[in-house]
Amino acid sequence: MTTAAPKNAGRMPRQIPYIIANEGCERFSFYGMRNILTPFLISTLLLFLPESERTGEAKHVFHTFVIGVYFFPLLGGWLADRYFGKYNTVFWLSLVYCAGHACLAIFEDNLKGFYLGLFLIALGSGGIKPLVASFVGDQFDQTNKEKAKVVFDAFYWIINFGSFFASLLMPLFLRDYGPSVAFGIPGILMFIATMVLWSGKKKYVHVPPTPANPHSFMNVVRTALLARRPGEGRPGLNVALFGAVAAVASLAMSVQWGFVIGACAALVLLLAFGGIGASMQLERARGAHSEEAVDGVRAVLRILIVFALVTPFWSLFDQKASTWIVQANTMTTQVSLLGYSFNVIPAQMQALNPLLVMLLIPFNNFALFPLLRMVGIEPTPLRRMTAGIALSAAAWVVVGNLQVELDAGTPVNIAWQILPYALLTLGEVLVSATGLEFAYSQAPASMKGVIMALWYLAVTVGNLWVLIVNAGVKNQSVIAYIEQSGVGVMAFQMYFFAAFALLAAAVFGWYATRYRMVDHYRGTAPAGA
């Protein structure tokens, strides 16, 4: 049974601070370990490899880990929506998360033990990822939903508050006290996050899991694909079957591509061709399923197109913790500011991202967006996301130009990375913070956990593009082509990703003009419910 809506209609729910505090500690723990992962792998754990291979392997491990983090939301969303509810799923997976941090601290010099820790963190962090944001949304109803945007912004702000201090401090702890301390401190913060969440248990609105539903998303899709009409074929089913065959072929190629690339590509093929096939025959499900169920599936399929077009942004964004750190390692690190000179640890540049987010969210809400409205431009969610993807492309053009200078032997100060960080972070605020609100508001009630998981799955696909491109540049014919271009391999990749995102922004902007927004916030619970 759903707990009653907050008594003070229209006011901020009193339980929100517990969730916000939990998120701040959890994000410190996650970014604390994530932002030192690449330098730790290069300098310590992968020393058994030839020096020329360490950077490439570190990037591969990092992006494989990120793929896991953003794949497991599918599992967490399914468990919460169907069996345990959001709170219980978050609490128990948080304990798995704590165990993963413990493994990193204990097995600092043991490859298998360390990778086990990364797996447990990916499972725990990924499993709770779609649920905490949607759990925030559950605390609101039609009487106070206008407060939700403020809380989603605060939610994103606290994420970056935790990330800022983690990014600033953990590289110092890694350098001065070693990996066991640097990975142990985030584990302590994760345990605190879990206890804060538990302490607010009796105050939350608990939306129960959805029981087995004959009109569920998958049942409607299955009916649509298998239904026959007299005198008509089943083109949608043929498209879905083609996707299934292509997925099997992708798995078979895992021997050559690597399991992660093969498996993720198989999942993408199933989702893409299955969704296209279902949309082609969806009207055939009417009659066998309710109008509401069929319309809900159509809404989800439309949302998935938006999510797919966001994936290039994530392929650019997550490389700031891998490719950009590798670039920073080749820059001069002494920076002068206000008459003081100091050395910057390359991984500390990650702190710029959350710092700028904390500044840009209020700037956008109180200055930029009101100014746009004054000149007659409404910054709708999809317009914001379009601009964000384009800004990420601009950031990679700048960082590519810096790489060209470095490849030419020109000394470049690490402070020059501030500009691409600023562009990328503004893009992040417009895409990621907006995407959380968009995903929740557009998801039908029975699909909120899963649809949020699919939003995070876009990050998995974005990192899949990175693995594919990195694997591609190991091909001799590709290397020969890059050499003819007149720029180095790393700079060429940077320009390639910039073009990839710019194309995605153009297609996203076109689709945004055709997307019809809906409102799927829950209704007000009756008094005493």
Image: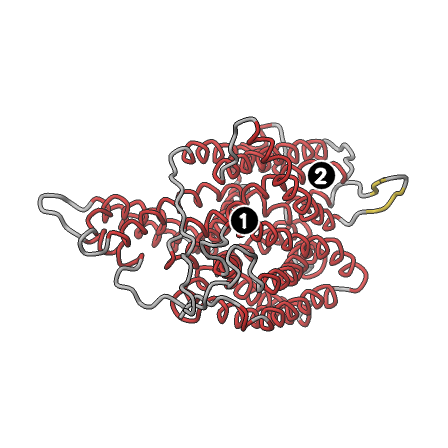
Q: Nearer the viewer, mark 2 or mark 1?
A: 1
Rendering coords of residue 228 (x, y %): 14, 50
Rendering coords of residue 422 (x, y %): 67, 38
SS under mark 1: helix
- How crowded pointer 2 is (Cα within 10 Å; few <14, some 14-19, many 20+) is rated as many
The residues tagged by marks 2 and 1 sit, at their Cα atoms, a distance apart of: 31 Å
Residue 483 seen from this side: yes
Question: Amino acid type of disc 2?
Answer: Gln
Is 125 rendered above or below residue 271? below
- Looking at the image, which is closer to me, 499 or 140? 140
Q: Residue at x 50, y 35 (%)?
A: 383
Question: Amino acid type of disc 1?
Answer: Lys
- Looking at the image, which is closer to me, 3 or 251? 3
Q: Quadrant of the C terminus?
A: bottom left
Q: Quadrant of the N terminus?
A: bottom left
- Looking at the image, which is closer to me, 140 or 502? 140
Sequence-wise, the earlier of marks 2 and 1 is 1
SS under mark 2: helix
